Amino acid sequence: MSQRKIKKLKKLDKILLEDSDVVVESFGCKEKSFFEILKNNKIFLILLILGTFLLYLNGMGGAFVSDDYATIPNNPTVTDMTNMMGDVFSFVTLSNSVLANMFGVTSPVPYHLYSLLVYLVICVLVFAFTYLLLGRDLAYMSTIIFAVMPIHVEAVTWISGKPYILTTVFMLAGLVNFLLYLKTKQKKYLWLLIFFETMALLTEKVRFMSLLLILVGYVLTYWKRHNINISKFLMIMLGLFVVSFIILKPFIVNRINIVNSGTNVSEGIFYDPFFQYPTAMAKYLQLLFVPFDLTLYHTMYVFPIWLNWSIVLTYLSCLIYFYFKNKNIFFSLAFIFLAAAPSMAPVKVSWLVAERYMFFGSLGFAMFMGIIIFNLFKYFRLIAPTIFVSIVIFCTIRTFTRNLDWTTNHNL
């Protein structure tokens, strides 16, 4: 190998390993509250909100599609607030009931606008979280990438995708308060973390566990930085998982029955893990990197098993490598499937693959891309901005066209 090639490889290795074991300027930043972060970055956030709103505007006039009919226009109890506060209470059903009483059930526009408003709040929370974790510049890049990702359209433009965005709002708010607690040691942030996790639980009885998994992942990644008693923390988290499972077992059983109601009973309620995980993980990574075959039925577009295993083994190898070489990249990659893990349980509580299941996990991908491009920019002043702009333009166009898919049942 020539000396020139060796130098290039060493340079690339240096780029990938930069900021190793760093939580960033993050905990050196002067802001000590969520609102301080917003105030000091208000121009960026205003532009972000305006741009994201315009990007999704072409999907706001879409009709009710698919499951929307059963939950809103064809639901005889949708306007009954007392019914919505009963045994099946969640913020999803409550919001549908409030909107139905305010605007009726003939026009889907108010329901679309509500989902878009929630998404704009999510984008702001994404910025606050990445700002605390990765610093201002990386937060700018990661948030922009997140805001335009086409994989989000199913959860945002499809009215029935509301459970995923509402749960994400509460979980992100919990993560922001967790980082603020580590930064300031003020117990009010710990109580806010508990409050928002409870709100996530009241929204979705399974996927709220994503927050617990991400907290475990964060502590295992950065425990040295914060001097955390890791054994005590893990015991607390294990207790929370056990208690959550015991309390929520009836809801989990009900969800299993719903998902498996149209399938052959002889197939069982468990996926084959040697098929499920390589298939789902490979497909999600492809949809994040190359969001072409976006569809409601991804089982039609799975890869050959050898390719699935190759992609998964490459991903796992990167996790092991970056855990020792660059904690920020490791946590970003791990975040993807820690967030999606409840939807990928071996018991059939969800379908095999769906874009809405990756809504929260896509933040990990956005952070990963932001870190790589930001480090490249330090050495390749023209190439890195070109890559970033190209990604944003491509994703913007793909999101715009994907919105059109969700406007009618025919397009879908």
Image (spheres, rainbow, N blue to C red):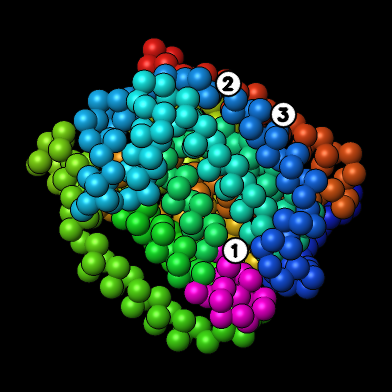
Q: Locate the C terminus by quadrant.
A: top left
Tell me the kind of residue under disc 3: Ile
Q: Which mark is residue 58?
A: 2
Residue placed at 24% from the left, 62% from the top? 248
| Residue 360 in the image, given as x and y percentages of width and height | 50, 49
Please report contact status of discs 1 and 2: CB closer than 8 Å, yes or no.
no
Relative to the observer, which residue lies in front, 36 or 200?
A: 36
Element class at badge 1: helix
Q: Which mark is residue 193?
A: none
Q: Which residue is mark 3?
A: 393
In the current view of this chain or complex, which residue is farthest to the left? Answer: 266
Residue placed at 45% from the left, 70% from the top? 194
Question: Residues in magenta?
Answer: 175-191
Q: Which residue is mark 1?
A: 176
| Residue 212 in the image, given as x and y percentages of width and height | 44, 66
Tell me the kind of residue under disc 2: Asn
Tell me the kind of residue under disc 1: Val
Please report whichever mark, 3 or 1, sits nearer to the chain's N-terminal start. 1
Give the CA distance from mark 3 to mark 1. 29 Å
Against 391, is 340 above or below?
A: below
In this rendering, position of residue 123 left or right of residue 334: right
Against 387, is 166 above or below?
A: below
Residue 85 counted in the magenta span: no
Element class at badge 3: helix
Against 322, is 115 above or below?
A: above
Give the CA distance from mark 3 to mark 2. 17 Å
**Crowd tier of the residue under label 1, counting other residues whose Cα lies within 10 Å: few below 14, some 14–19, many 20 or above:** many
Give the CA distance from mark 1 to mark 2. 31 Å
| Residue 156 visible somewhere in the drawing | yes
**Crowd tier of the residue under label 3, counting other residues whose Cα lies within 10 Å: few below 14, some 14–19, many 20 or above:** some
